[in-house]
Amino acid sequence: MAAQIQRQIQKAFGGMLAVYKGLEGEGYFGHRGPFHAKVSIELDGKRLVEYEESLGSPGPDRPPFDAIARSKHAISRRAGEDTVDVPLADRMIGDTQYWGSVVREFEGGRIIVAISGLQPWFDEALSGVLASILLGLLKHEELVPQGFEPDRSRPDFLTEEWLSELPESHAAESAWP
């Protein structure tokens, strides 16, 4: 299962990179560029998979983005919250002051993603994109609970059966073109 999850993380990373490249093309990151991401997935309170990847190299005059991402990740893991929601007073000595990590919970577990190298608001945005894509892929592959089982005995907006339940005047307005 860990190998399957690892593949889904790599797919999600590719999806997040597409968003990154789109924003980069618009000039949002200025002189910033290389960044580091740390992802972990926990099931039933146990860390199941950890993954780290860097895009580019920070160079000698740039901060250690890998260490900052790991610190953001540790803060979110301890607090169970996005780093933007963890007050500086609640952080430990040696923790980064920057924010940019997210926690996405699902039935029986959670995903923690931390990115560092851009502005904190873009670190957080890309962490959220990566976490959301990953959660969708894991649910799609049924590697984690989907958390929703529709009542298929009832018509809904995905079927045309619901039209028969509407009054005649509304049904004509609501029909698909």
Image: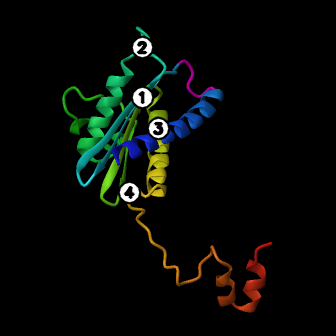
Tag 2 secondary structure: loop
Q: Write down the residue under mark 4.
A: 144
Tag 1 secondary structure: strand
Tally the numbered discs.
4
- Callout 1 amino acid: Glu
Query: In this orientation, does residue 97 appear?
Result: no
Q: Residue at x 53, y 38 (%)?
A: 16
Circle 4 packing at 10 Å, graded few (<14), some (14-19), many (20+), is: some
Q: How far apart are marks 4 and 2 (CA)?
A: 38 Å
Q: Which residue lies furthest to the left in this view?
A: 93
Q: Distance between the residues labelled 3 and 1?
A: 9 Å
Q: Which quadrant: the C terminus?
A: bottom right
- Image quarter of residue 70: top left
- Callout 2 amino acid: Arg
Q: Write down the residue under mark 1.
A: 53
Of callouts 4 and 2, the N-terminal one? 2
Q: Which mark is residue 10?
A: 3
Q: Do the residues labelled 2 and 3 touch (CB within 8 Å)?
A: no
Pinpoint residue 80: horizontal percent, then vertical percent.
28, 47
